[in-house]
Image (cartoon, helix red, strand yellow):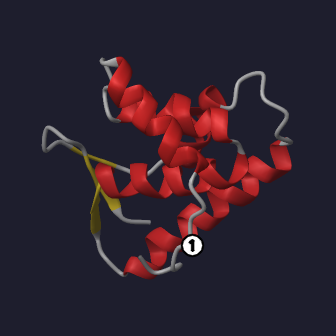
Amino acid sequence: MPTIIKRGGARTEYTRDKLRASMTLALRKRPVPREKVDEAVGRIEQRLMALGEREVKSDRVGQFVLDELRQLDKVAYIRFASVYFNVEKPEAFAELLREALEPREKTDAAS
């Protein structure tokens, strides 16, 4: 797995448990089975490997998580996105809601 480059420039090893924990937090009290979360984590890992890069920015990983959460559960997507994008204004939150409800094409596994 590639090394993850944090927003501040620090580098850290990829950790499956940390990724799963982030997704599980967003999915807290939502009706999504653990198996579905594990499958989503697996797809994210496949996308990371398909990039063929030794280092990947955490923003890219975050986008992969958003893609998966959007498919799994709209509420979890909004929860994660509101923290990820540091949403502070009601207008920005409303935009997240609109985006979550828009139909979206399936993303390419290599993007």
Q: Residue 99's spot in the image, x, y percent?
A: 48, 47
Q: Residue 23's spot in the image, x, y percent?
A: 60, 38
Question: Compared to 111, does 96 lie above or below?
Answer: above
Q: Residue 46's spot in the image, x, y percent?
A: 56, 72
Count up the numbered dots: 1
| Residue drawn 48% across the image and 58% down it | 64
Residue situated in front as seen by the camera: 60 or 106: 106
Q: Residue 107's spot in the image, x, y percent?
A: 53, 73
User: Seen from this angle, which residue lies furthest left?
Assistant: 9
Examine the image and state in which quarter residue 1 appears: bottom left
Residue type at tag 1: Glu
Category of crowding for the residue at label 1, using alpha-carbon neighbours closer than 10 angstroms: few (below 14), some (14–19), many (at least 20):
few
| Residue drawn 50% across the image and 42% down it | 98
Question: Compared to 29, does 105 lie above or below?
Answer: below
Examine the image and state in which quarter residue 33 appears: top right
Question: Compared to 76, does 14 lie above or below?
Answer: below
Horizontal side, residue 63 vs residue 10: left or right: right
| Residue drawn 55% across the image and 65% down it | 45
Q: Quadrant of the C terminus?
A: bottom left
| Residue drawn 61% across the image and 47% down it | 69
**Which residue corresponds to mark 1?**
105
Under circle 1, the secondary element is loop
